[in-house]
């Protein structure tokens, strides 16, 4: 999540300094990308001058890291931290500092049909480096895999899509359930429609996650996983059919 802090906060005496420092702490740890607007502002430098030198250096590093990472891999979801006291939002993604801190403390939600098998699928298809990052962030409670309940996934996604902040911390993965390539099921279309432009999502191109199993793994399953002789023969036929070119 990219967090842009309105430079006016640094001269506002009513601002909770500990909350402001917590946002920088999240940027320093790499949990979020923290920036200020305008990007170079004397008010930020004045505020830094009042901090302990070590704290000031860490705040600068948080900003530098946020800019560098965002330049290499631009953040999709952004919130602006502002001074507004009128209502909950100045606009759809502008929030007050206290709201921002509470929101940024919550894990990023990966909404899936099944939080066990789909979680394992995501970790299996992730490259080594990305898999390590996902596991570390899950262990730190920065991300969470949420069970969508299969057919109830559309309803849950719709609920989050109607809430600005919830939509910003949600990503959805779901099967296409297509009987033929390029023709997703009615349920898959509904989930995609519900997410729309508010929630980022990925619809699998193949019918289900099981269709992404490597051929070698299937061959091992058909030959060596204990079962009756008749079932082994059926397995081998299925694998041969799966491996047959289109």
Image: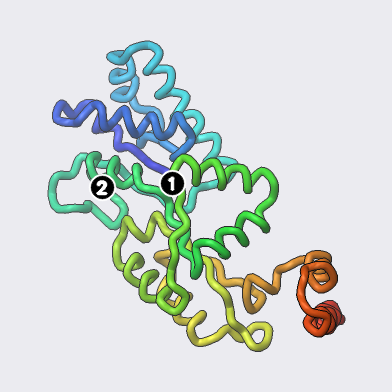
Which residue is drawn at the image coordinates 48% and 83% (left, top)?
187
Establish if 26 lies above or below 183. above
Q: Quadrant of the C terminus?
A: bottom right
State left or right for residue 206 relative to residue 17.
right
Establish if 163 lies above or below 48. below
Which residue is drawn at the image coordinates 22% and 40% (left, top)?
98
Across and down, in percent, residue 39 comes to 40, 33
Which mark, residue 84?
A: none
- Depth check: 102 or 122 in front? 122
Across and down, in percent, residue 217 comes to 79, 65
The residue that label 2 is drawn on is 95
For the residue carrying disc 1, how many other residues have a C-alpha within 10 Å: few (<14), some (14-19), or many (20+)?
many
Which residue is drawn at the image coordinates 66% and 57% (left, top)?
124
Across and down, in percent, residue 21 comes to 31, 27
Which residue is drawn at the image coordinates 49% and 28% (left, top)?
64
Across and down, in percent, residue 156 comes to 37, 70
Q: Is residue 246 visible?
A: no
């Amino acid at each position: 999540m990219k967090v842009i802090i309105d430079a006016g906060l640094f001269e506002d005496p009513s601002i909770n300094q500990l909350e402001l420092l917590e946002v920088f702490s999240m940027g320093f740890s790499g949990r979020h990308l923290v920036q200020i607007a305008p990007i170079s502002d004397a008010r930020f430098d004045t505020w830094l001058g009042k901090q302990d030198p070590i704290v000031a250096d860490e705040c600068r590093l948080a900003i530098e890291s946020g800019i560098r990472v965002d330049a290499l891999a631009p953040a999709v979801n952004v919130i602006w931290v502002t001074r507004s006291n009128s209502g909950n939002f100045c606009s759809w993604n502008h929030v007050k500092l206290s709201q921002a801190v509470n929101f940024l403390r919550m894990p990023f939600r990966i909404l899936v049909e099944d939080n066990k098998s789909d979680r394992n699928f995501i970790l299996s298809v992730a490259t080594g480096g990305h898999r390590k990052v996902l596991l570390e962030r899950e262990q730190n409670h920065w991300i969470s895999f949420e069970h969508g309940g299969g057919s109830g996934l559309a309803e849950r996604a719709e609920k989050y899509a109607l809430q600005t902040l919830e939509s910003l911390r949600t990503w959805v993965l779901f099967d296409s359930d297509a009987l033929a390539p390029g023709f997703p099921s009615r349920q898959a279309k509904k989930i995609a429609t519900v997410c729309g432009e508010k929630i980022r999502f990925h619809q699998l191109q193949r019918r289900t996650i099981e269709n992404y199993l490597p051929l070698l793994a299937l061959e091992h399953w058909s030959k060596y996983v204990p079962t009756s002789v008749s079932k082994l023969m059926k397995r081998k036929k299925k694998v041969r059919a799966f491996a047959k070119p289109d």
